[in-house]
Amino acid sequence: MTTTAPATVEEVVARYEPVIGLETHVELGTRTKMFCSCPTEFGAEPNTQVCPVCLGLPGSLPVANKAAIEATIRIGLALNCSIAAWCRFARKNYFYPDMPKDFQISQYDEPLCVDGYLDVEVEGKTVRVGIERVHLEEDTGKTLHIGGATGRIHGATESLVDYNRAGIPLVEIVTKPVAGAGTLAPEVARAYVTELRDIIRSLGVSDVRMEQGSLRCDVNTSLNRPGAEWGTRTETKNVNSLRSVERAVRSEMLRQASVLDAGGRITQETRHFREDTGDTRPGRSKEEATDYRYFPDPDLVPLAPDPVWVEELKATLPEPPRVRRERLREQWGVSEHDMESIVNAGAVELIEATVAAGTSPDAARKWWLGELARRANEAGVELAEVGATPAHVAELARLVDEGKLTDKLARAVLEGVVAGEGSPAEIVAARGLEVVSDTGALTAAVGEAIAANPDVAQKVRDGKVAAAGALVGAVMKATKGQADAKTVRDLILSRLGAA
């Protein structure tokens, strides 16, 4: 079928209504796995953190991890969910190499947390995203396909499986369908995952690092004609960055609209997002719940959280990130628009930590949202992964405030920090980048610039003060940019009687 894709989401929304839904998987930061005592350390040698239980060997019996149950309840409470008085684990049956037992212990019709919501802000509008369920399960292993060009099974010459991740506690957070977002659907998806990540990080139950897979998102998208029933959805699997969540929704809206415009039908299937092209590719047909043959796990007792315990956990919840952001906005003296920019850049915690390290909110914003944001965008990484820490930025701002660095020199120092050369002070010493503050050396450089440019010097004497810029430039060149431009200008005007 030949299709012509719409150019923008505005063109899509002129004819169709998008409906989105998100299934987010969060690996909990517990010391041991969900049903055994194997460690959960990230990056260990393959297949070294396994035992008969997480490998599903005959005769092994699982025991539920209380810390994981507690963490899941806290997540549910933070998302305004009701906590089940009684629930249980089920076996989700499917055959795949990364599941050594050939079933996954999960929850099906009796989840731990249900019926919550999360409010997000998008372009000045509050959008309430309903939470269908928050349930607890075990993660799968990790499959590595070798020999192909894409890292996927198609074209690979061999596949390897690492079962270290199999059995790690995994929380799945499933939204209700989100309709009515219109052209903002991609932004709503990103804002929701961003806010969810901030909440989970504030709870201290996971590091929610998308690049390491401890936060993974499946994005559901469908289109329907206005007033018609919701359309057939697709599920874009394992989207691994906030930017990609937004791009995946936008890509599916454009693709599905082109298929429907041509008279085609959308197939219910899983799809894979391609970071290089920004579009999705078909995966497999989407299973229904009946295909998994769920049934209660006979080896695990039901869960019945004590209401008193639940209330105690509720009392330990930290300040919600949304409330915290408003408090910080007032403390920092920034507008709502500026705070939205900070949030969109993923810089709230970074700026807060930088201010706590001893610099002003304005200076922290300047460096994180300016030079460092530019470098993060160029590298295609999140701001927190750019290579600089809040302590680095606070130290850099302090050197500027003390007059030891100009902004230009500070950017050069920041380049060294990002490259891993050390702290700002170490880079200043190693590269010899400190501002030239020796009055004698500056005076000599000013004299040489005036002597080399007599015509310009005369213009300054005649009252054309703006001409001093050329002399300032000459001095800056002679000092390799390490002089303070204002000091140099003052010296020049004083020397030429124009001060």
Image: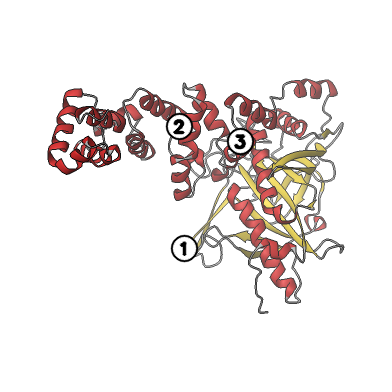
Can residue 425 be seen here? yes
- Residue type at the position of mark 1: Gly
- Residue type at the position of mark 2: Thr
Q: In the picture shown, does residue 468 fall above or below 251? A: above
Q: Which residue is mark 3?
A: 339
Q: In the picture shown, does residue 248 fall above or below 3? A: above
Q: Residue at x 83, y 61 (%)?
A: 230
The earlier-in-sequence mark between 2 and 3 is 3
Quadrant containing the C terminus is top left
Q: Who is closer to the viewer here, 343 or 131?
A: 343
Q: Residue at x 72, y 49 (%)?
A: 22
C-alpha span from label 1 to label 2: 37 Å
For residue 431, what is the image quadrant? Answer: top left
* Residues under numbered marks 1 and 3 in contact, where contact means CB atoms less than 8 Å apart: no
Judging from the image, what secondary structure is the residue with disc 1 in? loop
Q: Which residue is mark 2?
A: 389
The earlier-in-sequence mark between 1 and 3 is 1
Quadrant containing the N terminus is bottom right
With 396 as the anchor, is 354 left or right in this view? right
- Residue type at the position of mark 3: Met
Q: In the picture shown, does residue 45 fall above or below 244? A: above
The earlier-in-sequence mark between 1 and 2 is 1
C-alpha span from label 1 to label 3: 46 Å
Q: Residue at x 77, y 24 (%)?
A: 314
